[in-house]
Image (spheres, rainbow, N blue to C red):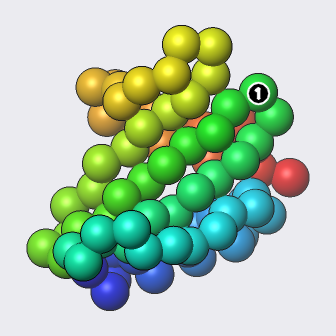
Amino acid sequence: MTTVLFDLLERLDAAKIHYTLSRNRPDTVLVSITVVGMRVEVDVFRDGHTEVCVFKGAEGETEDTGILERIIRENTH
């Protein structure tokens, strides 16, 4: 998890995208990202896999594996 988590945080920092970290489950760290018009929750699991939920209009988990890349690219300052 450490590498995946820190890689994500470094990318968000480089893009100057605000985020917060929290821990709601014993096997994950939650990265909450807020950009104009949407909120994104990224659960980074102990084994390194991630789950991304995007909340805009109709809120819910997305099956779009490229969504996180587009969000970072489109919101880089």
Residue neighbourhood size for the residue with mark 1, other residues' Cα within 10 Å, grouped as few (<14), some (14–19), many (≥20): few
Residue positioned 42% across, 25% down in the render: 60
> Outermost residue toward the bottom?
2
Point out residue 37 in the picture as x, y percentages from the top left corner: 76, 27
Evaluate whether residue 59 shows in this view.
yes
User: Which image quarter: residue 23?
Assistant: bottom left
Residue positioned 51% across, 22% down in the render: 59
Q: Is residue 26 left or right of residue 69?
A: left
Q: Amino acid at mark 1?
A: Gly
Q: Is residue 18 above or below residue 47?
A: above
> Outermost residue toward the right?
77
Point out residue 36 in the picture as x, y percentages from the top left corner: 81, 34
Number of callouts:
1
Residue positioned 36% across, 58% down in the render: 43
- Secondary structure beneath dot 1 equals loop
Q: Is residue 34 above or below residue 23?
A: above
Point out residue 48 in the picture as x, y percentages from the top left corner: 21, 70
Point out residue 14 in the picture as x, y percentages from the top left corner: 71, 70
> Outermost residue toward the top?
58
Q: Is residue 71 above or below residue 19?
A: above
Q: Is residue 66 left or right of residue 22?
A: left
Evaluate whether residue 69 shows in this view.
no
The residue carrying mark 1 is 37
Residue positioned 63% across, 13% down in the render: 57
Q: Quadrant of the N terminus?
A: bottom left
Between 13 and 32, the one lying in front of the other is 32
